[in-house]
């Protein structure tokens, strides 16, 4: 039942002790504010990590050769490892069930690229159609390289969006236009773009891998081999599948190229999922730390409420004695003290919640720095935290109230 006299008492007490009540509420509100902001930063870190790795498929594996560093089978260190088409074919047959997509890359050198006799200073990359999904390329116009292009050594090209903006700004669409690569004409069939912030990747020109090798002295040489593995039901299962495939891949390539098993630098294999695991583990640790800092701040606020309630009880000892002498029941006195504690905690808690959520809503979308993107927090989690805070405030008010009930009437009436 709504007791107007109880509320009048609470507001009278607050009016008499404005500064004390304000400082108590500020400590509680700051606890909620700090916790929500820290949780928002934690979520922003997870968003940033996801954005960083969106450029390439998280389950992709990238392989490129380097030089040996260990003597093996009579071969001196310093040998350059050269990937071949045969490597790709053998892996596709022996490990084909372990991946969904696979691409080959060849980078021909010292080529002259022209568009209507104007030179274009962009890199040429020979590849196949699967690279689009492995690198998460976005097609803005036309299409990407396909298997038919590779099979028939087609002279077609897919250009990056930055090339389209810089070299083809005066045409409605570059699709169907021709560029000349070292004297050979290539028809533009598509324009691609990149996820994320690394727009330098959009300065590439893709042509079919077979055409690049055949036309530009590539023979059967490869610079990179890339794979995209399937995503399993859980992250742990995906990670285990990734490690199993990587181990088998590394073992085959080292055996084929006569590389010592302990030579870790001759063949470089990069797994984005390993980086994802590392960053997510770090972000989880930071999130736990944020929770700890926020909760300890809230606890400090609750302790402040409890201390203030002890002061209130001390100041109102004589009043409590009179109430008990007039027949007030213990639970009515406990309710009086707890009511004030809950009210101050609830108002301060919701004030901190509203202010912090408002700040995240206002500033969050504009935050876009390395590994922190759009910090935000789940409202249900934040609201539940405030409810827990109010319960803690009730507990904080209970013990001073229980102490007030235990005071003998005679002692209370004698209190000055």
Image: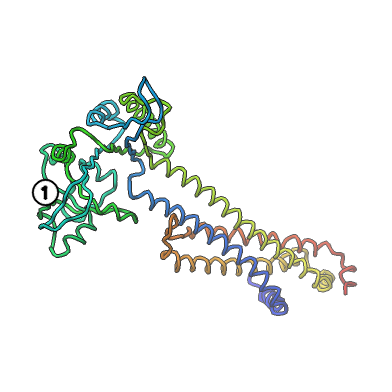
Judge by depth and name the residue closer to the eye, 137 or 32.
137
* Residue sitting at x 50%, y 58%: 41
Regarding residue 229, the answer to whether it shows in the image is no
Residue at the spot of label 1 = 186
Residue drawn at point x = 28 percent, y = 38 percent: 224
Q: Is residue 186 left or right of residue 97?
A: left
Residue nearer the viewer, 77 or 327:
77
Quarter the N terminus occupies:
bottom right
91 left or right, relative to 74: left
Could you tell me residue 120's position as x and y percent? 18, 55
Q: Is residue 28 above or below residue 20?
A: above
**Residue 173, image x, y percentages:** 13, 60
Q: What residue occupies the far top of the structure in this picture?
A: 73
Residue 252 position within the rendered picture, expressed as x and y whole percent measured from the top left: 33, 26
How many callouts does the rendering have?
1
Residue 223: name its quadrant: top left
In front of the other: 176 or 29: 176
Quadrant containing the C terminus is: bottom right
- Nearer to us in this view, 72 or 35: 72
User: Dot 1 lies on which element?
Assistant: strand
Horizontally, is 367 left or right of 160 in the view?
A: right
The answer to whether residue 227 shows anywhere in this view is yes
Location of residue 152 in the rendering, given as x and y in whole percent from the top left corner: 10, 38
Up the image or down, 89 lies above or below 376; here it is above
Please tell me in which quadrant of the rendered image residue 340 appears: bottom right
Q: Is residue 75 above or below residue 157?
A: above
Model colouring: rainbow
For disc 1, the neighbor class at 10 Å (few under 14, some 14 to 19, many from 20) is: some
């Amino acid at each position: 039942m709504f007791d107007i006299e109880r509320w009048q008492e609470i507001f009278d007490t607050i009016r008499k002790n404005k500064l004390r009540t304000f400082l108590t509420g500020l400590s509680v509100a700051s606890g909620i504010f700090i916790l929500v902001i820290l949780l928002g930063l934690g979520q922003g870190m997870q968003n940033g990590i996801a954005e960083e790795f969106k450029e390439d498929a998280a389950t992709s594996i990238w392989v490129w050769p380097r030089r040996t560093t260990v003597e093996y089978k009579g071969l001196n260190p310093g040998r350059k490892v050269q990937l071949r088409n045969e490597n790709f074919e053998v892996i596709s047959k022996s490990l084909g069930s372990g991946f969904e997509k696979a691409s080959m890359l060849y980078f021909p050198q010292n080529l002259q690229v022209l568009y209507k006799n104007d030179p274009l200073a962009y890199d040429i990359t020979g590849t196949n159609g699967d690279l689009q999904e492995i690198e998460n390329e976005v097609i803005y116009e036309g299409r990407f390289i396909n298997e038919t292009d590779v099979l028939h050594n087609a002279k077609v090209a897919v250009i990056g969006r930055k090339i389209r903006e810089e070299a083809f700004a005066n045409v409605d669409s570059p699709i169907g236009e021709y560029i000349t690569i070292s004297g050979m004409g290539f028809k533009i069939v598509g324009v691609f773009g990149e996820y994320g912030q690394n727009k330098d990747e959009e300065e590439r020109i893709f042509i079919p891998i077979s055409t690049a090798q055949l036309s530009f002295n590539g023979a059967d040489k490869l610079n990179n081999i890339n794979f995209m593995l399937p995503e399993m039901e859980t992250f742990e299962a995906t990670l285990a599948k990734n490690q199993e495939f990587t181990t088998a891949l590394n073992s085959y390539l080292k055996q084929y190229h006569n590389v010592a098993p302990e030579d870790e630098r001759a063949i470089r294999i990069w797994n984005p999922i390993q980086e994802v695991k590392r960053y997510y583990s770090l972000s989880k640790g930071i999130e736990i730390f944020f929770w700890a800092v926020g909760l300890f701040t809230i606890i400090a606020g609750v302790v402040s409420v409890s201390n203030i309630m002890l002061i209130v009880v001390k100041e109102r000892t004589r009043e409590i004695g009179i109430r008990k002498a007039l027949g007030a029941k213990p639970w009515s006195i406990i309710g009086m003290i707890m009511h004030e504690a809950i009210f101050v905690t609830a108002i301060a808690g919701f004030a901190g919640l509203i202010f912090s959520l408002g700040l995240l809503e206002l500033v969050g979308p504009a935050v876009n720095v390395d590994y922190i993107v759009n910090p935000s927090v789940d409202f249900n989690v934040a609201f539940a935290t405030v409810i827990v805070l109010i319960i803690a405030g009730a507990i904080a008010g209970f013990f001073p109230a229980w102490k007030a009930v235990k005071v003998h009437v005679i002692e209370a009436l004698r209190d000055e």
